[in-house]
Image: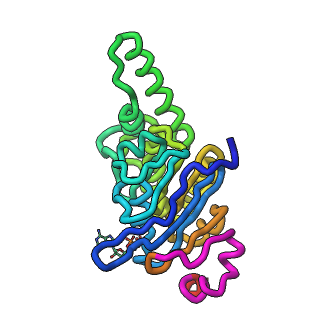
Amino acid sequence: MADEVLLAARNVTKRFGGLAAVNDVSVDLWRGRIHAVIGPNGAGKSTLTNLLSGDLPPTTGSIELAGVDVTGRNPERISRAGLGRSYQKTNIFLPFTVWENVRLAAQSRAQHPASVLRRATAFTETNERAARALDLAGLAARRDAIAGTISHGEQRQLEIAMTLATAPHVLLLDEPLAGMGTAEAERMVGLLQRLKAEHAILLVEHDMDAVFALADRLTVMVNGQVIATGTPDAIRADAGVQAAYLGEEH
Ligand SMILES: Nc1ncnc2c1ncn2[C@@H]1O[C@H](COP(=O)(O)OP(=O)(O)OP(=O)(O)O)[C@@H](O)[C@H]1O
C-alpha cells in the first residue's frame, strides 16, 4: 500500500549531559519514499538513527512504528516490529558464504515452533525469505562466494541483504555508499531505488550526488537541530542550508 506513514518520530530529543545531540526533531517515513538526513559532522544524524532503531532511548519525544508506540523499546523488539537497520560497522561473518550470512540473518527472525511439522514449514519460510533478500539485493549470482573474498561494494550489498532477510518495512541506512568507487556507488543507488517501492527508507549519506539523486525529501540538521526539511529542489534553493552546509560543497 502506497502513501502510508510507517514511522513517525515526534519531537525527539537526546541529551548527553549538557549537549542536545538531537534537539526536538520530528520526521515521517513513508512507504515508497526515501527520506535523507544530511548535515555536517556532529550534526546528530547517527544519534537520530540510534533513537529510531532503539539503540538509544530518547530523553523526550515519541516514536511510532506502523501506528504502534515503540518509544523506549529495545532494538530487538523494534526490529521484530518491522524496522531494519544496516550498520556502518559490518555484521558480516567473513569466513562464511554469502548465502550462509543471509540465511543466518533470516533465521534470527524465525519463530521456534514446538511441532515438527511447523518446524519444517518454518525452515522453508526462512530459506525463502533469505533467497528473496539475496535476489532483491542483487547478489544471487554471488551466493556461494566466501564473504571475506567479495568486493567492498558487494559486502555493503550483503549487509543490505542481511537486513532485508529480517523482512522489515522500514529501512535505516547509515552511509551505504561509504568507501565505494563510482561503479559500485551507481549499483548501490540502483539498489536503493528498487528497494524504495516496498519500504520506507531513512538514508544518512555524505555523498551529495547520490542523496540528491535518490531522496524524495531531505532533512538538514546542524548542531542537533533541523534547519530545513523539504524536497531536493527546495533544499537546494534554501539560503540557510547553503550558508550552513551545501555552500561548502556546491
Ligand atoms: N554517546 C555519546 N556521548 C556523548 N556525546 C555523544 C555521544 N554520541 C554522540 N555524541 C555527540 O553528539 C553530537 C552528534 O553526534 P552524531 O554522531 O550523532 O553526529 P553525526 O551527524 O552522525 O556526525 P558524523 O557525520 O560525523 O557521523 C556530537 O557532538 C557527538 O560528539
In this view, the residue in front, 174 or 49, is 49
x then y, percent, for residue 199: 59, 47
Q: Is residue 244 magenta?
A: yes
Any part of residue 52 in sight: yes
Q: Nearer the viewer, residue 7 or 179?
A: 7
- Pinpoint residue 60: horizontal percent, then vertical percent: 40, 64
Q: Is residue 227 magenta?
A: yes
State whether residue 220 is above or below residue 131.
below
Looking at the image, residue 111 sits to the left or right of residue 140; the answer is left
Where is residue 247? Give x, y as percent.
59, 87
Residue 36 in percent (x, y) is at: 57, 64
User: 206 or 51, which lies in front?
Assistant: 51
Residue 100 seen in render: no
Q: Residue at point 58% right, 89% down?
A: 243
Q: Is residue 203 above or below residue 135?
A: below
> Image quadrant of ligand 1?
bottom left
Name the dominant secondary structure of the magenta segment: helix
- Quarter of the image that includes the N terminus: top right
Number of marks: 0
Q: Is residue 113 above or below residue 12?
A: above
The answer to whether 85 appears left or right of 169 in the picture is left
Please name the residue shown 45% across and 65% down the image: 12
Colour logic: rainbow
Q: Is 231 drawn above or below residue 63 in the view shown? A: below
Which residue is the extreme one toward the bottom?
243
- The structure residue drawn at horizontal position 44% and vertical position 51%, both measured from the top left corner, is 85
Query: Which part of the image, by quadrant, shows the C terminus?
Result: bottom right
Quarter residue 127 falls in: top left
- Residue at position x 44%, y 80% from top? 223
What residue span does the magenta drawing correspond to? 225-245
